[in-house]
Amino acid sequence: MLIGVLLLGGLFVLPLWNITLEAPQYPEPIGMNIHINKIADMNPNDVQNINIMNHYVGMKDIPETLPEFEIFPTVVIVMMALGLVVAFFLGHKWYLVWFILMCLLGAAGMYDFYLWEYDYGHTLKETAAIKFENSDGSPMAYQPPLFGTKTILNFVAHSYPRGGAYMLFAGMLLSVLAFFKGKKEVTS
Amino acid sequence: MKNFLKSTFIVVLLSTFIIGCGPKKKNDSGALGKGAAEKVYVKPGDHDEFYAFISGGFSGNLTVYGLPSGRMFKEIPVFSQFATNGYGYSEETKPMLNTSHGFIPWGDSHHPDISQTEGEIDGRFIFINENNTPRIAKIDLKTFETTEIIEVPNSAGNHSSSFVTENTEYVVAGTRFSVPVPQRDMPIKDFKGNFKGALSFISVAPETGRMDIKFQILMPGFNYDLSHPGRGKSHGWFFFSTYNTEEASTLLEVNASQNDKDFIAAINWKKVEEYVNNGGGTKMPANYAHNVYNEETHTATSTMKKEVLVVNPSEIPGAIFLMPTPKSPHGCDVDPSGEYIVGSGKLSANLTIHSFSKMIKAIEDKKFVGDAYGIPILDYDAINAGSVKQAGLGPLHTEFDGKGNAYTSFFISSEVVKWKLGTWEVLDRKPTYYSVGHLTIPGGNSRKPQGKYMFAMNKITKDRYLPTGPELEHSAQLYDISGDKMELILDFPTHGEPHYAAAMRADLIKERSQKIYSLEENKHPYAAKKDSETKVVRKGNEVHIYMTTIRSHFSPDNIEGVQVGDKVYFHITNLEQDFDVPHGFAMIGQNTSELLVMPGQTKTSIWLPKQVGVWPFYCTDFCSALHQEMQGYIRVSPAGSSVPIKWSLGEDIE
């Protein structure tokens, strides 16, 4: 359980998620690493270059600050503190409680991420130089996939979890294992 | 009739015979050998194995090619103005072409040589000489840009240059035309005994590569044609071929060809270096330009230097010797071991090879046959290692494959001859098309040549390619030299008049090649590093426009308040930080070239508006999907007008 909790600390170092864009003009793809407290370049200057590409279709710049960048780290710290309390002072049943809480918060986080992506891909400037339409005549949106790969015009966008997320999943998995191990010990 | 038939029959028979015995043009690579096409084919998207840096001769530039494909990648402007990107036109690069004679827009580039560490090429810098107004340039192979040019005083026809020593301690420049030193008004006929031939040793700072003339040796007034450094055992020596040891000043084609032997001068530069380090030599007044490009300010500065340290050979006995070499030697090439010095007597059919160890022994034993102006002349028989007999006509240059073989170009018989070091036997010969000058093997001037390919750079093209009127580019031929016999595998045109080339494996250079200039590190005094820093400032009749470019607009793009008679400076900063996104700049009626501004760079050009009106400018490099929209206007009012300076982007000027 303790290791599981400590693995959450990885979120402060490693990116949670990554969106990589491939295009004919980018033999070396460009991308952004999404951390709990910032959106960073995958390679130097990538965020600036994504903004330059996207401004033609009226997309906003990728934000340097978001309320989430304050909220997420706080939530992680609180959960880590809770986890430590659980690990040292409480029984194995609380492990499961902590895990479920983590799942709920994780789902909320993903939903929040989806909302941001939706807004990023749909809220376009009226003055956009290039306006594409879908076959039904509705304005084209440029929302990157939440998870997976999607073709958007000349770009192929890949959206997948990164090191931070894997450590988070591993930590959560360990808490569940710790629960079952504790349960087994009690019953035997 | 019968006779006619008979003679026709004989003619037919004879021609069949002649055709059958004539030179076979087909590539004889054997059933299992790879075809020439396959050997030079680099498939789309793949990279070549070697870089070749081919001098542009009278273009004044250096061109970058890939081998084995023969594709040209870049023309690097060095000694000539280059309207393509604004080199020598922009305010930042004009100082690069400053000399003691003022601004010179053109040069004649000759012999590129890549920097070395412990006798192996390291791919950091490439040096190249300018023949007409003696200069040495340094090109940084991180950016493939000319970053330094130093003028060479007391010199004329800077030809036996710019070869580097084993650890790039020095890049060496020797004068082809001897001149009065210092220059003075005197009768030309008094040349003999009065003119001097300056050999300049330019030190190269180990970290920065910064050049400085450490000393000049004032040799007798011969013509110093080519040179090469000693290496390995002969490291510390430098060898210069000479002609016109007759010291003629007129009709040299006859008068400089009278002596049976001229010399290869052997200079123990370590000894001279020690002498000057201990305070030897004389500081003499001089005037020469030293131009340095700063990659942070993106600006060159030109400094006039006023002094040079000169050394007379008589001051340092035991440091300089003359090796008799038949018939006006041109090339003077040192093999990878440093033992053999190959002299190509260009009016001789033979090659003369001197032995370094025999030379040292002859010096110890004082085997001298006389002296020239006090410099000992060594006994030919005591130093000679051998000669390649009747190898061809008009030998010029020799390169080595690192496997004990040498390859010499023959101008008159238009061929490359492969021969063996030590036995001096001719192993193979292949024609060139036509009249080869230099030839290059990657890593040629080093201890470790990379002997897979050799290419010949020719002086005459004639029918090799589709005709283009009387003026043609020069031709080059690439040979596979990995087998016993040379095999011609590619023929490609080169730009300008390639004199020589330096080539090396691509990997070292490729890894270090820079993609952009960091905007953060841009310290140009007129840079606008973000949109909010753009402005237009009037200082008297000078108007400074701090302008930025980013896909797909200039900022500002509407400017008012400029007047007829103003001197308008466009300081353009490219805000892009993405690989291969330059923006160009051109202004209608501007009496200069365009600017091509790389990501993160700032460049400046001047416009002198002569007529009132509203005049457009635009981006010249197809930068993006909205490149055609990348334009702006400047309003020019009459001199003394009250229209104030104003600028804007994205809104009307109020």
Image: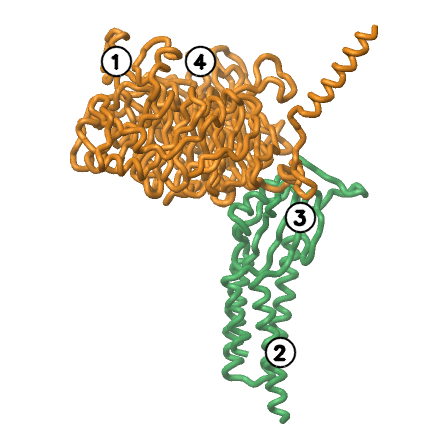
Chain colours: A green, B orange
* Quadrant assignment, res B568: top left
Residue B293 lies left or right of residue B435; in this view the side is left
| Camera-nearest residue between B325 and A169 | B325
Chain identity of mark 2? A
Q: Secondary structure at mark 1?
A: loop
Q: Which residue is mark 1?
A: B192
Residue type marked 1: Lys
Q: Which is in the foreground here, disc 1 or disc 4? A: 1
Using the image, determine if residue B409 lies above or below residue B423.
above
* Quadrant holding the N terminus of chain B: top right
Around disc 1, counting alpha carbons within 10 Å, would you say few (fewer than 14), some (14 to 19), or many (20 or more)?
Answer: some
- Image height of B581 relative to A36, above or below: above
- Is B232 placed left or right of B396 in the picture? left
Of the residues tagged 4 and 2, which is closer to the observer? Answer: 2
Label 4 SS: loop
Mark 4 near mark 2, Cβ–Cβ under 8 Å? no
How far is mark 1 from mark 2, CA to CA? 99 Å
* Chain-order first, disc 1 or disc 4: 1
User: Is residue B152 rendered to the left or right of residue B398?
Assistant: left
